[in-house]
């Protein structure tokens, strides 16, 4: 008879980075924001013709200038989103979780798992479709705030590993 083995956290720890699907959704949203900004800018510039003068107004409202501006905005926003996405990760140890974040200033926060009694998984439609989600650690002491591991790929695996520790 074959024994079933529980999945355990490989020692010394697990490193979890945010899901690439969450990154793709953020990048798509960033493209939408840039398009909306360009639309608002194009509409708003039509009222500035008197203040800017004919020559400046013609340059700013040209299709090439607006496309170039939109492309530069999208590149900057994309770079920021990717760098932010890469800077957030978690490390699960047998008795604690390290939260890392920050682009210019690195932040590290350590959470003692002995203070938490349970964990929940939250997944929306897209999260289930692309197999990522948010794990919430719920404290067993009154007044202890919940901790969240955001946009985790394969969250059921990590949830079972965390529940095993708790």
Image (cartoon, helix red, strand yellow):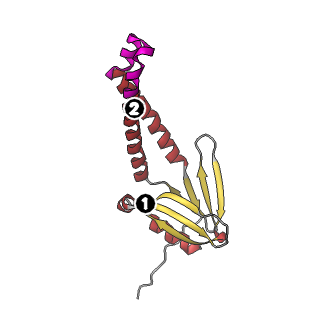
| Residue 59 percent location from the top left of the image | 37, 16
Name which residue lies at 50% across and 72% down: 160
Q: Which one is earlier in the sequence, the residue at label 1 or at label 2?
A: 2
Name which residue lies at 40% across and 22% down: 47
Badge 1: residue crowd in 10 Å (few <14, some 14–19, many ≥20): many
Relative to 57, say whether 154 is above or below: below
Report which quarter residue 29 is drawn in: top left
Asked if the residue at tag 2 contacts the one at tag 1, i.e. Cβ–Cβ closer than 8 Å, the answer is no
- Circle 2 SS class: helix
Using the rendered image of the protein, determine whether residue 124 is visible from the camera's viewpoint. yes
Magenta span dominant secondary structure:
helix
Report which quarter residue 40 is drawn in: top left
Name which residue lies at 48% across and 42% down: 81
| Residue 135 percent location from the top left of the image | 51, 64
| Residue 138 percent location from the top left of the image | 59, 69
Quadrant assignment for the C terminus: bottom right
The circle drawn on residue 46 is none
What is the magenta range?
A: 42-63
Residue for badge 1 = 132
Quadrant assignment for the N terminus: bottom left
Is 128 included in the stretch rendered in magenta? no
The circle drawn on residue 40 is 2
Badge 2: residue crowd in 10 Å (few <14, some 14–19, many ≥20): few
Relative to 59, say whether 79 is above or below: below
Q: Residue furthest left?
A: 63
As drawn, is 40 to the left or to the right of 94?
A: left
Name the one closer to the observer, 52 or 82: 52
């Amino acid at each position: 008879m074959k024994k079933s083995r529980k999945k355990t956290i490989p020692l010394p720890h697990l490193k979890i980075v945010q899901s690439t699907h969450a990154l793709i959704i953020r990048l798509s949203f960033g493209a939408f924001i840039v398009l909306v900004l360009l639309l608002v800018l194009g509409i708003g510039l039509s009222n500035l013709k008197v203040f800017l003068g004919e020559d400046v107004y013609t340059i700013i409202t040209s299709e090439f200038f607006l496309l170039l501006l939109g492309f530069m905005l999208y590149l900057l926003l994309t770079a920021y989103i990717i760098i932010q996405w890469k800077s957030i990760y978690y490390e699960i140890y047998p008795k604690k979780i390290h939260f890392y974040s920050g682009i210019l200033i690195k932040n590290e926060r350590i959470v003692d798992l002995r203070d938490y009694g349970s964990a929940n998984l939250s997944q929306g439609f897209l999260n289930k479709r692309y197999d990522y989600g948010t794990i919430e650690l719920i404290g067993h002491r009154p007044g202890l705030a919940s901790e969240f591991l955001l946009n985790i790929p394969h969250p059921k695996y990590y949830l079972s590993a965390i529940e095993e520790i708790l």
